[in-house]
Image (cartoon, helix red, strand yellow):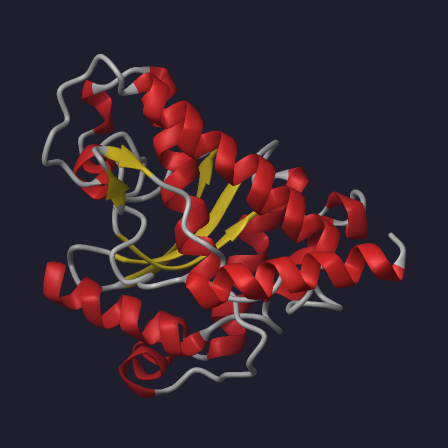
């Protein structure tokens, strides 16, 4: 990609971020009854060198947008008035495969953008204490997380979740499923998550998924993870 193209993408993304009003209500934000794609909270090139600008542009403006558009189409003849996306996700077995795939894709990606940040952060507070209690150390949690991400066959996600019993656990899900879904093998409130679909990393890392997942730890927004943990405790 030439420098003019990179500059254009960065400027566009910064402009979008500037018009962003609230990310707190996502991924259930709707306009006139339809789910919407909110702007990214950072520029396309903000996560370089770990995630390149072209991957971010394609991932967000094509893949995520397609999930939102197709979710709205799949829900067109369904009475979901007043329901949040989380409400739908938690009862996903009641809906079509199209709603499951695209609703999951919208929720997962909205969550993913928030858990990434160009700002360097570190585990702290109650979450750090709980990770140390349940895994022994942050490094041991990362090892288990990396293994779950690397061993997920085909496309899917790896997660750190808060279970109903209050324990943290590392799990993975196929395709666009997530631990909130009533069909999930292991249920819980997501604290961290990484997208291991090839479109998330292939332009830069090719088939080296493990390298991509290792790079992910340089971008984790631990402040947001702490908020997710606190919110999960309240929901639990």
Residue lying farthest to the top in this orientation: 77
Residue occupying the point 68% across, 66% down: 215
Q: Position of residue 227 (x, y in %)?
A: 28, 72
Mark yes or no: residue 171 visible: no
Mark yes or no: residue 222 visible: yes
Q: Position of residue 61 (x, y in %)?
A: 58, 42
Image quadrant where one finds the C terminus: bottom left
Residue lying farthest to the right in this orientation: 2
Quarter assignment of residue 176: top left
Decide which of 224, 125 is in the foreground and name it: 224
Quarter assignment of residue 218: bottom right
Above or below, 229 against 63 in this view is below
Decide which of 144, 81 is in the foreground and name it: 81
Residue occupying the point 32% across, 75% down: 226
Q: Is residue 223 left or right of residue 117?
A: left
Q: Is residue 213 left or right of residue 159?
A: right
Residue occupying the point 64% across, 69% down: 46
Q: Position of residue 15 (x, y in %)?
A: 55, 63
Q: Is residue 116 left or right of residue 163?
A: right
Above or below, 173 against 16 in this view is above
């Amino acid at each position: 990609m030439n420098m003019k193209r990179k500059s254009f993408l960065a400027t566009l993304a910064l402009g979008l971020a500037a018009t962003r009003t609230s990310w707190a209500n996502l991924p259930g934000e709707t306009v006139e009854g339809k789910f919407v794609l909110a702007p990214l909270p950072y520029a396309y090139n903000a996560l370089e060198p770990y995630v390149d600008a072209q991957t971010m542009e394609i991932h967000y403006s094509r893949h995520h947008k397609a999930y939102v558009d197709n979710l709205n189409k799949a829900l067109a003849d369904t009475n979901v008035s007043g329901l949040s996306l989380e409400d739908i996700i938690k009862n996903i077995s009641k809906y079509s495969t199209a709603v499951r795939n695209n609703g999951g894709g919208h929720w997962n990606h909205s969550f993913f953008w928030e858990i990434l940040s160009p700002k360097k952060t570190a585990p702290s507070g109650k979450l750090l204490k709980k990770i140390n209690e349940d895994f022994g150390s942050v490094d041991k949690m990362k090892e288990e997380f990396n293994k779950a991400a690397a061993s997920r066959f085909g496309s899917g996600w790896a997660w750190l979740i808060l279970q109903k019993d209050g324990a943290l656990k590392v799990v993975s899900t196929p395709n666009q499923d997530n631990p909130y879904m009533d069909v999930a093998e292991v249920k819980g409130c997501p604290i961290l998550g990484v997208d291991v679909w090839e479109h998330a990393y292939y332009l830069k890392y090719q088939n080296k998924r493990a390298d991509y997942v290792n790079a992910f730890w340089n971008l984790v927004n631990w402040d947001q993870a702490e908020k997710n943990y606190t919110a999960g405790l309240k929901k639990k």
